[in-house]
Image (cartoon, rainbow, N blue to C red):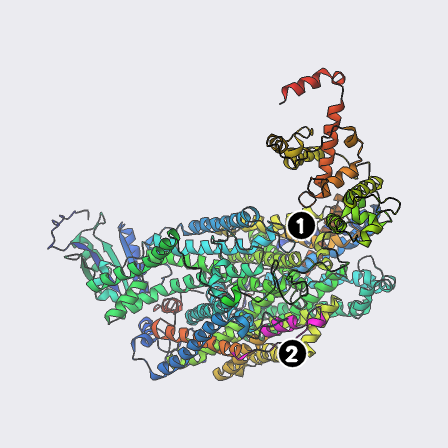
Amino acid sequence: MHTSPDTKNKIQVHTLAELGPLPMKVALGCSILLPVAFVLGWFSENGMEKFAFSYLQSTFFFLSISLGALFFVMIQQLTRAGWSVVLRRISEFIAMGVIPLAVLVLPIVLLTLAGNDILYSWASAKNVAADQLLQAKAPYLNSGFFALRYLIYFGSWIFLARFFLYKSVAQDENGDPELTLLMERRSGPGLLLFAFTVSFAAIDFIMSLDPHWFSTIFGIYYFAAGLVGFFSMLAITLIYLRSKGLLHDPVTIEHLHDVGKLLFAFNCFWAYIAISQYLLIWYANIPEETIFFLHRQSHGWGTVSLILVIGHFAIPFVFFMSRWMKRNPKALFFWAVYLLVMNWIDIFWLVLPNAKTGSETMSVSMGMILVDVCCTIGVGGIYVAGLLKFADHKSIMPVRDPRLEESLEFHNI
Amino acid sequence: MATTIEQPVKTKAEPELLGLLAEFDDPNALIEASKKVRDAGYRKWDTHTPFPLHGIDEAMGIKWTILPWIVAACGLTGGTIAIGMQYWMNAVNYPFLISGKPLFSIPACIPITFELSVLLAAFGAFFGMLVLNQLPKLYNPLFKSEAFRRATNDRFFISMDAKDAKFSEIDSGEFLHSLNPIGVEEFWSDVESPKLPRNLKLALALVGVLLLMPPALVAYKRSTTTNSPRIHIVPDMDFQPKLKAQNTTNLFPDGREVRPNIKGTIPRGQFKDDNIPFYYGLKYLPEDQDVVVIALQDEKKTDAKKTEEKPPADPKADAAKTPAEKPADPAVDAAAAEASKLEKLPWVTEFPMPVTEKMMARGKERYRIYCSACHGLGGEGDGLVSLRAMDLQQGTWVKPASYHTDNVRKLPVGRLYHTITHGVRKMPAYGAQVPPEDRWAIVLYLRALQKSHEIDATTIPEAEKRKLRDTK
Amino acid sequence: MASVTAKPIDTTIEVPGKRTPLVTGAHDYGTVTDAVCRLAECKTPTAWYVALGISASLMGMLFGLIGYLIITGVGVWGNRSPVFWGWPIVNFVFWVGIGHAGTLISAILFLFRQNWRTGINRAAEAMTIFAVICAGVFPGIHIGRVWLAYWLFPIPNQMAMWPNFRSPLLWDVFAVSTYATVSLLFWYMGMIPDLATLRDRATGKIQQFAYGLFSLGWNGSSRHWHRYERAYLLLAALAAPLVLSVHTIVSFDFAVSQLPGWHTTIFPPYFVAGAVFSGFAMVLTLMIPARTICGIQDLLTDRHLENMTKVIIATGTMVGYAYAMEFFIAWYGGNRYETFAFINRAFGPYAWAYWIMVSCNVISPQLFWIKKIRTTPWMIFVVCVFVNIGMWFERFVITVTSLSRDFLPSSWGYFKPTIVDVLMLIGSFGLFMTLFLLFCKFLPMVAMAEVKSVMPRPGGKSDHH
């Protein structure tokens, strides 16, 4: 703990290192569950499918959070937002999660390059030869191009996340307002790059699990899910850090209230995107499209779909709407954890029904959930450890951001 | 401070002091002053600003409004009305199927439910705000103050109501002066209540009368009759140059506007050859198509009869008969030949579907509706229609058949089905009114009626007998 | 006192950490009032009468044509098999789209605490309402027998029938009428304090009576303001999802069908983005001349214009994203009808319309990446006019290309508008401009109370952050 070089403000600089070694230990401890999930998968029926899909689900669950963070950071810079300065650094840290995730996603890409069709049926030449549609889509859905796109996506995200974190950290040292202007200028094209990479990544890694099915809104759906995940994660982190005495003074109830409002709003946005997709497919009733929802209404997946409708949208919409819920840290913490779980279920619902036993959709079972939960905690351990590593010895607040004062004084109307 | 002032006697001539008004030119000064007024314990007072002043709520101690709850309640009402309306109108009161959607389905309800919730909630917000603020209130004594005109421009005011328990003209005035305003003035009630201008009254009356006219006209028209024909607003839509059934035309050689079915076509839903026992009551369609034609087609039968009554017999009808027999009376001959041919057809003897309790109940119900009028509830041929015809001693009346003769008992179920479908002798065809499932159900019930007449009473267990006696 | 210097400053530059003032010039509360009220109080300029004369004649032409249409039938339009949704529906979607900017500025930017909206929100809201009125005309007369239009609403009728609530066209009736009502309430509610200002400044009897009647006896009471602000916030919170829902439901008109080129799941957000895009372009097209003519550049600064151009780049790029995604999925989906529909758009008989759409909607807003163009009003104006043209063509491309060539090549056709189609579109602009000119003359064009609330207080501290 030391004070900022900016003597005028006398702002104390805190780092996550002040939390001690415990968080890192816990995170690394959790990561042991990843091999456990693998072993569990090994011993259960269709276990490799379960594990492969769970692994994809886990990585893309955390990826959605980091991408949400990246979006948030860029949009704050673009709009010259003042209120959010105190919590922007935490968001920049979360965005850095794309680096460990790039490594974690690599096995999936390698597996596909090897022609394994456990996840992507289009990856194996045998399947392509037997399917006219796959042949038609081969110029796009082939392992070589897939690997190249993986490099483009993660390359862009890592570039953006590093750019916005390191420029902001550099400002901690020199307090140069030019850096703020630079980030503002870069965030416009950055968002453009972000929009296309995220949409196509969602199409490649999740939508192409069922290579026959297609939906133009899919990229936006994944993006909306990611924002819900990110704002939950942000609220959880902020409330946790406040409880540890870090960020307690700069991040006030007013900031939490705003994070809560954004969480609520983007949860509604997610519902809007989800219902738009459902309603259009339901109404037109074209078999090649309804198959997506048919898979998710049979083999026990109907219950999961209902959990999403009621749990992800209806319950938070009614109970999380009130001002009190967002201004009370304990209540906000509850809703953030709750919506993070719902976001997990959402990605689960997107990915896992594509797993097959023979030609049938794999039923949702306790075994599947167990493997997936272990897998998520394992991947999450590595992810959080990565975040802590990047955050190490960096201030948890942009202490010399020119708009910091405005953020510290921020009040809701 | 708590000096009460003497209430002036209310006369028309004397205006009443309603309160005091202090003017400020700085919003921050107003906030500071407001805090002092609040702390002095005044209750009936207000500040007036040209824009919503941040911080004045705390300075004045204004309580949080209940408006959000009004809005929530209105929104909920809107949503409920929308769902109820859509359900009742489309699924109950005027049910119709469209584009393969259920009569009532949640996804299709979402848009309108959302819109009505928002609409009513918005009404709640707007009108709720007006009601809570007691607006519109076009007359306000403050408006008489010339200085107060700037309350909506660039000046800030504190108004103090004389009805406040702590109010006194002198003390409160001094207190207000101590807050360093630009000026303090009193505001008074009017000597006499303002009157509505005469022109305005006239205009309002005129508008009222004009507004009343349309409903009056409608009410008049709805309660009277007229001899003049209806007005055709769009004649070319009402009288379109197109062909309709039952009209004549010179366009076609047969002079009919309605066109017969094209040969070889089957109307939608009329394809029957995939389930011959069910639709025809036959095990299979016999090779000899003419026989089938005679047996199955009503129109053909009557046409054939008509032609046979004339001396030059229709060669086609002749060919239909077996050449071995050729009796003298062609009509009787044709009927007999037909009857014999009907007997030879491969009638089904078993029901072409599983027989269930439900089918029996349906058969009973349909029998009572369609058959019992002539054949009687027990199937003895003593229905009310028949009884009355006998009473009237109609010579042409043929008593309906009783089911309890050996002849009828012997008939296979397919033949009974056929009889219902196409009629026999004087009995008309019911094929057009009773769908095939119901015809089979009636046949089933008919069989049950026959069985009930054959059974030996002694074989019925006592419990069953009691039940039969007890039920009417 | 107002601490803003009289020296002109470039409001489009913002030094981080120092907020650029939203009101330039040596303004205090009183002069803001004067600047806004001057329009309603001064002698009307001749130019206004000329403009009103032209607009009103075009409006008269529109009403005349509507009369002709009602008497003769919808055959006066170019709507023929297979394109039964021709220009009238294109015009409807176009105008409804334009009607999105106002409520977006008032509601969503309000919720996001974008204070710069105070300079433009009043005019944008007014524009919204007038655009929705223009939009409402077209489906109203498209139904053929106009006098039976009440069948669209769930009111008991002589045939004991109810509307079909499972039809997206009926959803549209509810969405557009709710939107019109709520926008009107929002606009009017925002205007009540400003009408009171006009009432208190009015000198003529008629003005005093009219403004007095419509300002409902507003007296600026803080207790009233408290509830008023809550109500405004609540209306904003209601209007924000509403504004999304309206164009979403308009997109359902197309997207719930199975027609290639219409049935695609991205339609709802894509239509909303397009609507905001066209609405902002229209606001700028109107406000750039209006702010000069009315002399309110101090309240509606270059910074306001620049911020709006940024929204235009953002939404224009979203629209471009949707075009790209549609094209990609049309190929990726492997449905040959869908693929054909898109190839037909780009290279078929309507390729000219498609490329007008792409160049106006996707390429022209990209010019706003250049700061010079973003800060030069006449250049903004030119780009915005192109965007307006492009957005009309977008609706034309969607409606007409898909209908003119669907599954059955034997029933393909080529849509040609009639002169009535063209004149009605022009006439709708007349209706729009007439209403807008009347608004400029008689109502407060800038939300005075809101501008004052974001001005620095005499003490030096601003109210909002």
Q: Secondary structure at mark 1?
A: helix
Circle 1 sits on which residue?
A: A305
- Report if residue A73 is visible in the image: yes
Residue at coordinates 28% horizontally, 64% vertically from top-left? C212
Q: Residue C70: where, in percent of width, then height?
A: 48, 70
Q: Is residue B401 above or below residue B316?
A: above
Q: Secondary structure at mark 2?
A: loop
Q: Residue A312: where, in percent of width, then height?
A: 61, 51
Q: Amino acid at mark 1?
A: Ser
Q: Nearer the viewer, residue B68 or C464?
A: B68
**Chain holding disc 1:** A
Residue C439, picture quadrant = bottom left
For residue C350, which numbered disc appears in the image?
2
Q: Nearer the viewer, residue C275 or B393?
A: B393
Q: Which residues are magenta?
A: C394-419
Residue B136, picture quadrant = bottom left
Q: Is residue C388 above or below residue A219?
A: below
Magenta stretch encompasses residue A282: no
Query: For this view, does A228 lie left or right of residue A51?
Result: left
Q: Amino acid at mark 2?
A: Tyr
